[in-house]
Amino acid sequence: MQFGKIRDLREDHDLKQIDVAKILGVKRTTYAMWELGDVNFPIEKLVELAKYFHTNVEYMLNLTSDKREIIYEKDISVEFIGNQLKRYRLRLKKTQREFAKVLNIRQSSYSYYEDGKTRIPTNKLVTLAMTYHIPINYICGGKRKENISVTL
């Protein structure tokens, strides 16, 4: 999976890979492998970058041209993402077996994602998003900035 938008954002902000690696709390080599698509970019780290660059995960994954900022939940954990996946799957009236088949994995493996026992790889999340029109920004707890009401 290529992450050209992420490289473009980094370069547009005059940042080096080492700078972004520090922002994410990882080694430069780890970040470089993510950016090049050699290793799956963890969705939690993509959310951190989206917050930093004031954009959204779907834009960074090249799933949309809409760069508008999304406000994400403060704590994006494996459990949170798993719960969101389950809620969306049930909303679509699909079974775990159907989702697993799309991902070419066993149903028991898919259940680990929903149970928060295993992080869903970003490439598999993108596959689900493209197949079932699941908004990844929603799975990550995102809301449009203009939809957030301020109470005083």
Image (cartoon, rainbow, N blue to C red):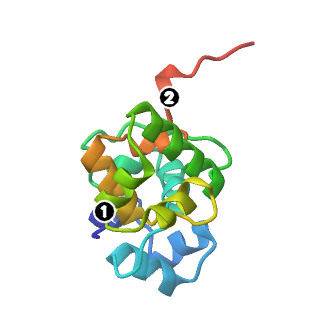
For residue 87, above or below residue 100: above
Residue 10: % across, % down: 40, 64
Task: Report which residue position mark 1 lands on.
Answer: 8
Badge 2 element: helix
The 10 Å Cα crowd at callout 2, few under 14, some 14 to 19, many 20 or more, is few
For residue 108, above or below residue 135: below
| Quarter of the rendering containing residue 152 | top right
Residue 140: % across, % down: 52, 46
The amino acid at mark 1 is Asp
Choose between 41 and 78: the one closer to the eye: 78
User: Along the horizontal axis of the image, is 34 left or right of 23?
Assistant: left
Badge 1 element: helix
User: Along the horizontal axis of the image, is 90 left or right of 11?
Assistant: right
* First-in-chain label (1 vs 2): 1
- Mark 1 or mark 2, whichever is nearer to me: 2
For residue 125, above or below residue 146: below
Residue occupying image coordinates x 52% and y 37%: 87
Task: Report which residue position mark 2 lands on.
Answer: 145
User: Along the horizontal axis of the image, is 125 left or right of 43?
Assistant: left
| Quarter of the rendering containing residue 92 | top left
- For residue 60, say whether it is visible: no
The 10 Å Cα crowd at callout 1, few under 14, some 14 to 19, many 20 or more, is few
| Quarter of the rendering containing residue 37 | bottom left
Residue 50: % across, % down: 47, 51
The amino acid at mark 2 is Lys
- Residue that lies at the very extreme toward the top in this rendered image: 152
- For residue 62, say whether it is visible: yes
Disc 1, disc 2: CB below 8 Å?
no
Choose between 111 and 72: the one closer to the eye: 111
